[in-house]
Image: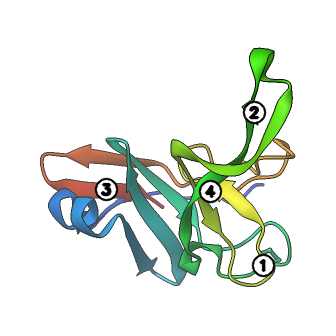
Amino acid sequence: MSAQVVRRDVVVASLADLRERERIIVDVDGTELGLYFHAGEVRAWHNVCPHQGGPVCQGKIMPRTVQLVRGEGGLKSGGPGFHPTDRNIVCPWHGFEFDVLTGKHPADRRVGLRPIPVRVDADDVIVTV
Ligand code: FES
């Protein structure tokens, strides 16, 4: 016999508040999660880093670093720069980065944050836990 997991919807924030703050960390019955608003999208991630379990959602939100190119055909390095729209969450323990919208590590797409189902209804941000 297998145990049955009962999931429920919980209103965890207002969309207006999340839009303004861009990130809100909440605790739902002992499960910490980070809510993010970026580029018109809402995401919810478990606040547990896949590296060594750090509180990843408490990390800074930074533009994704890119390597700029210059010269004809883009053959020369223009040095490091920042992506105009992509944002990464930087884990405060060891600096692993994860895309805010996909949860994926930029260099190894097999590594990523654990998602929590989230939706918006009117001004309510609702997670399923
Ligand atoms: S625990 Fe997050 S980078 Fe190590």
Residue 14 coordinates in the image, percent (x, y): 19, 63
- Is 27 located above or below residue 12 in the figure? below
Q: Name the residue under label 2.
A: 69
Q: What element carries label 1?
A: loop
- In this view, which residue lies farthest toward the front? 71
Q: Mark 4 points at which residue?
A: 4
- Label 3, label 2: how many angstroms apart (C-alpha)? 42 Å
Q: How many labels does the image show?
A: 4
> From this viewpoint, is residue 118 visible?
yes
Q: Name the residue under label 3.
A: 126
Amino acid under disc 4: Gln
Amino acid under disc 2: Val
Q: Which of marks 4 and 2 is in front?
A: 2
Residue 67 coordinates in the image, percent (x, y): 76, 43
Estimate how packed mark 4 is, as few (under 14), some (14 to 19) or many (20 or more) residues with alpha carbons within 10 Å.
Answer: few
* Image position of 16 (left or right of 22): left
Taking the image in four quarters, ligand 1 sits in the one at: bottom right
For this rendering, which residue is in front, 29 or 55? Answer: 55
- In this view, which residue lies farthest toward the top? 73
Residue at horizontal 31 percent and vertical 56 percent from the top: 126
User: Residue 2 sits in which quadrant?
Assistant: bottom right
Q: Do the residues labelled 4 and 2 touch (CB within 8 Å)?
A: no
- Label 3, label 1: how many angstroms apart (C-alpha)? 25 Å
Amino acid under disc 1: Gly
